[in-house]
Structure formats: C-alpha cells, structure tokens
Image: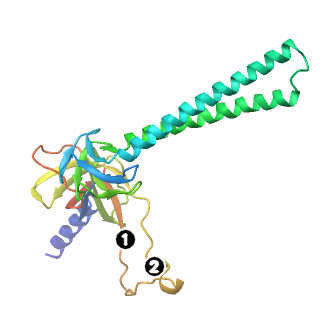
Amino acid sequence: MVIATGLVVAHEYIHHESQPWTRDGQVRAHIITVTPRVTGPVTNIAIKDNTLVEKGQLLFEIDDSVYQAELHKAIAAQSQAQAQVKKAKNEQRRSFNLEQKTPGSVPTLQLNNLTSAVETAVASLESANASIESAKLDLEFTKVYAPTTGYVTNFNLREGSQVVANNAVVALIDKESFWIEGFFKETEIEGVQVGDTAMVTLMMRSNTALEGHVESVGYGIAKQDGSTGVNLLPNVNPNFQWIRLAQRIPVKVKLTHLPEDLELRVGTTASVQVFKK
C-alpha cells in the first residue's frame, strides 16, 4: 500500500508539473474608451446598450450649431484675409512700377514696408485657411463613430446629456481581441513556452472544453510589500514564517476555435490547463 500510494503521488506530481492547471482564470479583451473630440449636448443616439456595432458605425451626434457658426466665421475671415493680400500686392506692384519708371520716386523704406505688408497679409491668409480646416474638423467630430467592431456595454448616455471633449463616454469591447488570462503559481510556470497547447473551461459553459495556445507569459506583477502607504511609510503585509505563499504570474491564452453559440464575456471565470512541450 505504501508503494502504491507513493506511485500515485509521484504520478500526480509529474502530471501536475507537466500539465499545470489553475481555476484562477478570467476572460479578457481590449476595451476601447470612445471619447468625443468636441463639447456639446447630445442630439441623437444611434445605438443601444449591450449591442454589437461595426467599425465606422455612427454611435451618437453632438449639437453642431456652434461649430457651424465657427466654420462660417472662419470662412468670412478667410475672405477678409484674401482681400488684404490682394490690396497689399496691388500697392506693392504700383510702387515698384513707379520706381522702375522714375528711379528714386519711392523711398527704399516704403518699398520694404510694402513687401513686409504683403508677407504679413499672406501669413494672415494661411492662418485663416488653418482656422477653416480646424472648424471643419470640429464639425466632423460632432458625429462620433465606432473605431472598431465590438460590443457596447454599460452605455448610459441619453439625448440632451452634455459631453465634454476628451472625456470618455462609451466602453467598446473589441470583438477580435478576446483572450483567456490564467494566473499560475510561480512554481508552475517553469517550462511553459509560447505555443504550448492549453485547454480552457469556462464556468458559464463547464461542459465544453476550449482549445487554445499560450500566447505569452507575464514578466512581472505589482509589488505589494514595500509600497508607500500612509505617512510615506512602507506597506508590509503580515505573514507566517513557516509559510511562503507562491506569487501568481499571468499566462495569456488565445483560443484556437470558439463555438458559434458561445459568446465570451469580459471578466467571467475560467479554468486553464497548459500542456508543456
């Protein structure tokens, strides 16, 4: 019985070392925070919460009346700048022609000033052109589109709500970016390599085993002991001298195939087993 027990223990140890397994896994994905580029009240919402949107699909619109006015103002400034350029060039041309016909009739300082006036007018025109481009961009930014195909979730925006530029208002989960993150003890990841086969079981679908492969192994985790706490003193967690807890390292697993009737959801629980080569 002692020998049999020893063989069973040895078999389980070898099996555990070559095929590490953890129940501490999660479904993860890249989450894009959609941020408006301009400020204003929302006038139209084109999506619903917890739905799939395609890349380039309209999400919502912001009141564009202010930005329309800014564009008209910029166009008017451009026309004024064009007139100033035309005037400055005409004055310069007349003076230079007069100087060529009657040398010395126009002072050199005046000719230099006319040249400077033309350069200043041209610079003002370029600034007006840039203002028009900026106004057109702001007008385009009043319509917010999906940057990629994904799932909108926890969407609470309503018509009439005021959105502020560069403040995120929509969470978009990238449809093509899902992966499984398994957290393995540091004593188990030795020998785990990129490309190793992995089997994943989701708590939400425990009767289905999903095949994948190791895409990467984490190179570090956040430090707990020694971090700065209250009054700039270090945080040190109490522990037992005879117990050394193994830290957990994230192992990223990409699924090879996903059943059509299964939808992954960020944050749900998974079990992961890796088969070392």
Position of 85 relative to 189 (above/below) = above
Residue 271 location (% of width, % of height): 20, 61
**Point 85% across, 12% down: residue:** 101
**Point 43% across, 69% down: residue:** 222
Position of 153 relative to 247 (above/below) = above
In the image, 259: left or right of 78?
left
The one nearer the camera, 232 or 49, is 49
The colour scheme used to paint the residues is rainbow
The one nearer the camera, 32 or 75, is 75
Residue 203 location (% of width, % of height): 14, 61
Position of 229 relative to 71 (above/below) = below
In the image, 256: left or right of 144?
left
Specify the amino acid type for callout 2.
Asp
- Residue extending farthest right: 104
Specify the amino acid type for callout 1.
Gln
In the image, 261: left or right of 174?
left
The one nearer the camera, 131 or 243, is 131
Position of 269 relative to 63 (above/below) = below
Given this view, does label 2 or label 1 mark the residue nearer the observer?
Answer: 2
Label located before the other in sequence (2 or 1): 2
Query: Quadrant of the rendered structure where residue 92 is?
Result: top right
Alpha carbon distance from label 2 to label 1: 12 Å
Residue 214 location (% of width, % of height): 31, 50
**Point 40% across, 87% down: residue:** 238
| Local SS, label 2 | loop
The one nearer the camera, 163 or 16, is 163
Question: Mark 2 Cα within 10 Å, few/some/many (few <14, many 20+)?
Answer: few
Mark seen at residue 225: 2
Mark seen at residue 201: none
Residue 22 location (% of width, % of height): 24, 64
| Local SS, label 1 | loop
Q: Which residue is mark 1?
A: 247
